[in-house]
Amino acid sequence: MDIATLIGLVFGVGIIVGAIVTGGDISTFVNAPGLMIVVGGTLAATLIKFRLKDVLTSFAMGIKTAFKDTSSDPREIYELVLEMGTASRKTGPLALEAFTIPNELLKDGVRLIVDGHKIEDIRNIVLNEINQTFLVQEKSEAMFRGIGESAPAFGMLGTLVGLVQMLAKLDDPASIGPAMAVAMLTTFYGALIANLVALPIADKLARKTRDDQAVQDLIIESISMIYLRQNRQVMAETLAAHLPSGHVPATADSEAAVGEAATQTGEA
């Protein structure tokens, strides 16, 4: 679970509720007509913008990304790939079946290698899986950004509705208060939904897409090198370029040291 999302939501809601309670009664911030305008209007606009199937898929993807850390650690993949490459080089591709591979994309690529597919076919299949994943993530990000844009707009619309109701009943002082509540609270609801929920989730989806791109580049290169049965030193140096900037794995350092020592011994 991504604890940062839960902490952020609890902290954000807690600050807002605390400020409300400190200054008055929280029930004054609950307004059914205002919620209907903002939530209902935002939902309607979202359904108009996107297909129902895409809305359901995107919503599930957004919630999963927000509350569950599904990203793979590129360093762990790097170390695992080096071990798999060494095993495949020594005893053949069937040795890869003995490894437990947590990343689904890498697992699919290795399975195709074991099944004897050509490298061109393997790359095409893996790239197609990547493109499909990116497509879902992009749709989900676009939907949550759309919610982030629509909610404040419907908040302003609710404000106009409340002001019209208030101006239409200036001769009735008792009705001015409820109309003013709709006018003010719809803006509050729209800003809250956009800035505490929709836009942060959209930003997290964008970050996940960037992180996944780096991991998937590493996986594609790894699959090719395992297929070609490259030696461990070449794999370590090549794959290290796909790791986060500034991080040189200990495996790569040790392999480089071994290679340099071997070179110096040969020259002597």
Image (cartoon, grey):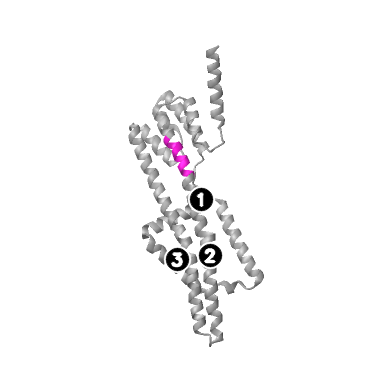
Q: Secondary structure at mark 2?
A: helix
Residue under pointer 3: 42
Q: Is residue 106 magenta?
A: no
Which amino acid does the dot numbered 1 rest on? Lys
Q: Which residues are magenta?
A: 211-220
55 sits left or right of 24 in the view:
left
Q: What residue sits 59% from the left and 62% below the top?
A: 13
To which quarter of the image does residue 213 belong?
top left
Q: What residue sits 55% from the left and 16% below the top?
A: 264
Residue under pointer 2: 191
Instruction: Decide which of tag 1 and tag 2 comes sooner along the chain.
Output: 1
Residue under pointer 1: 68
Which amino acid does the dot numbered 3 rest on? Thr
Q: CA distance from mark 3 to mark 1?
A: 25 Å
Q: Secondary structure at mark 1?
A: loop
Q: What residue sits 42% from the left and 27% below the top?
A: 88
